[in-house]
Image (cartoon, rainbow, N blue to C red):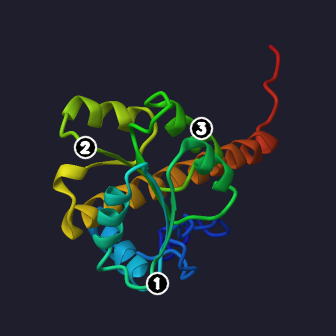
């Protein structure tokens, strides 16, 4: 077995770089190091953010909290219908108000997750209810942001969590595919059992 940057077997690939910067996989000492490296890479380029919120004031506050991500672009929509129509575009991250008028709380979240399974999705609400936070994460959000605590620091923290969760989900899919491929390769080399 040959040890490479990621400790892969000779002829096998490393886990893909999922930060969107096309620099290849890197060796890191810990999960925290990997996350710091990913966020450094993310802050080096403008992000394309979708904000789905019926409140113009809340959309402004989210935009204003992006001071570390200069030149980022924002697309804003006020309704669930407008959000679904625009999801064919690529976004680096989606901020979703949990309580939009005329929509059941988790139905839009589930629709977005079906259309954009790997895009980091942050659910925003005007409450600080820990049960709501648990529920939105279980329903498919990558992070939860209370609008009451909205600040550049809180946005940075939830972005880190959301990008880490999205990256982990992509890596898990990749590893599952690799395991399937390895099982298929191994089954070709297994000898049939001899009957006694």
Compute the Cα span from label 3 to label 1.
Answer: 28 Å
Bin the neighbour count of mark 2 within 10 Å (Cα to Cα): few under 14, some 14-19, many 20 and up: some
Classify residue 190 as left or right of residue 49. Answer: right
Residue 8 location in percent, x, y? 54, 66
The N terminus lies in quadrant: bottom right
The C terminus lies in quadrant: top right
Classify residue 140 as left or right of residue 194. Answer: left
Q: Residue at x 50, y 39 (%)?
A: 109
Looking at the image, tell me whether mark 2 or mark 3 is earlier in sequence order.
3
Q: 121 above or below 73?
A: above
Residue 138 location in percent, x, y? 39, 32
- 1 or 185, which lies in front? 185
Looking at the image, tell me whether mark 1 or mark 2 is earlier in sequence order.
1
Q: Residue at x 20, y 65 (%)?
A: 151
Say the numbered circle drawn on residue 126: 2
Q: 93 above or below 25?
A: above
- 56 or 92, which lies in front? 56
For mark 3, what is the residue?
111
Question: Is there a contact, CB below 8 Å, between mark 1 and mark 2?
Answer: no
Looking at the image, tell me whether mark 3 or mark 1 is earlier in sequence order.
1
Mark 2 vs mark 3, foreground winner is 2
Snapshot quadrant of residue 24:
bottom right
For mark 1, what is the residue?
45
- 145 or 166, which lies in front? 145
Bin the neighbour count of mark 1 within 10 Å (Cα to Cα): few under 14, some 14-19, many 20 and up: few
């Amino acid at each position: 077995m040959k040890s490479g940057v990621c400790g892969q077997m000779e002829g096998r690939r490393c886990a893909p770089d999922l930060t969107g910067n096309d620099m290849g996989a890197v060796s890191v000492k810990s999960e925290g190091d990997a996350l710091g490296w990913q966020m450094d890479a993310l802050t080096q380029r403008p992000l394309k953010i979708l904000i789905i919120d019926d409140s113009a004031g809340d959309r402004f506050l989210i935009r204003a909290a992006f001071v570390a991500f200069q030149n980022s672009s924002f697309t804003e929509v006020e309704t669930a219908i407008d959000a679904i129509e625009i999801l064919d575009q690529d976004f680096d991250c989606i901020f979703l108000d949990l309580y939009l008028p005329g929509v059941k709380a988790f139905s839009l979240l589930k629709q977005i997750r079906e259309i954009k399974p790997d895009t980091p999705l942050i659910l925003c609400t005007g409450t600080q209810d820990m049960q709501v936070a648990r529920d939105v994460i279980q329903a498919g959000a990558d992070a939860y942001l209370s609008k009451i605590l909205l600040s550049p620091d809180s946005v940075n923290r939830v972005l880190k969590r959301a990008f880490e969760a999205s990256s982990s989900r992509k890596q898990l899919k990749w590893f599952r595919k690799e395991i399937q491929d390895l099982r298929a390769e191994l089954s070709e080399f297994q000898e049939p059992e001899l009957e006694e």
